[in-house]
Amino acid sequence: MQKFSLLDLSPIPEGRTAADALAATVDLARAAERSGYHRYWLAEHHNMPGIASAATAVVIGHVASATSTMRIGAGGIMLPNHAPLVVAEQFGTLATLFPGRIDLGLGRAPGTDMATARALRRHMAPDDSFPEDVQELIGYFGDGSDTAPVRAIPGAGTHVPVWILGSSLYGAQLAAWLGLPYAFASHFAPAMLEQALAVYRSTFRPSDRLEKPYVMMAAGVCAAATDAEAAFLRSSQLLAFARLRSGRPGKLPPPTRDVEREIPPPVMAGVEQALSCSATGSAATVRQRFRTLIDTFQPDELMVTGMIHDHGARVRSFEIAAEVLADLSEDAVAA
């Protein structure tokens, strides 16, 4: 692993607004760029009181304009919610405004509940057209013909890098078949990580976009001066995830010293399993955990994410993570 990146959901803490969250995202992106992160991705979620990145392409443009060197992209756009042409025009415009810096990760899930999905799509098709939609979208980014009946303008000729995102074998198989890079959502659904990476790597077909498999895995991180302080800060994310799983989504709660009292044991067990692909603690503890994950799964790139109620503590957490990952990357090059 030689590259490390950051996934930001623009969390809205309790006591704060969506405007505060978007301002924090810009501040975090600038700090991430200074810290050496390779890319900074934002994700599409809808009807979530605690997430401000619903209009993902708009936020990507805002972040790209506030930075200068990092790649900025979507991790991801939930393609079933959109017409491929509209996504091609949005990301073609971004790529035109910020040449060589825009990524497009595509997901197959709705990124929301079914009522909201119906509100987004209006007319929900009964068939799964995701593979065809991905290929249609990639086609709009190609050079194509000036006489084609439908073109993405801007978009045509931009060759925006397209990734397949997933948390199951489906995305791994599709990414391998299309010869695209693959990002696994192990930060919240790690159960099939090992199997999915094996399928992707063993069945990959080279394409004009990618010669050999390229894997990015995601991991949570909560780093602080001490293990105890990091565990305290992480309690906010545990509470938020438990509430989401219990059908009570909300803003990111403040941390607590006694999180076990607020989350029933069966729920906590599920939360801990879902968020198990993570590193929490001091720099030394985080380094050990990341080394284990990297040695075990051999990703080409590691993307970290994490929600902390206090913005300053969140920025510092990602700075510590960057210092650790930069050292591990140097170790890998030296080896």
Image (cartoon, rainbow, N blue to C red):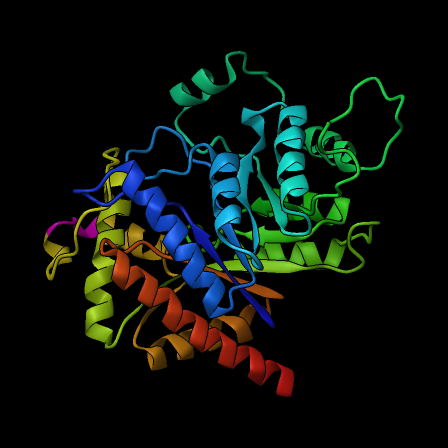
- Residue 186 in view here: yes
Quadrant in which residue 232 is drawn: bottom left
Query: Is 324 left, or right, of 92 in this rendering?
Result: left
Q: Whole-percent x and y of residue 9? A: 40, 46
- In which quadrant is the N terminus drawn? bottom right
On screen, residue 323 above or below 250: below
The residue sitting at the bottom extreme is 334
Is residue 321 found inside the magenta-colored segment of the image?
no
On screen, residue 329 above or below 53: below
**At x 30% / y 37%, what residue is drawn?**
18
Q: Whole-percent x and y of residue 331? A: 56, 85
On screen, residue 303 above or below 241: below
The residue sitting at the top extreme is 123
Q: Whole-percent x and y of residue 143? A: 84, 37
Q: Whole-percent x and y of residue 51? A: 34, 39
Is residue 263 found inside the magenta-colored segment of the image?
yes
Query: Which range of residues does the magenta coloring cover?
Result: 262-266
- In which quadrant is the C terminus drawn? bottom right
On screen, residue 22 above or below 202: above
**At x 58% / y 31%, what residue is drawn?**
79
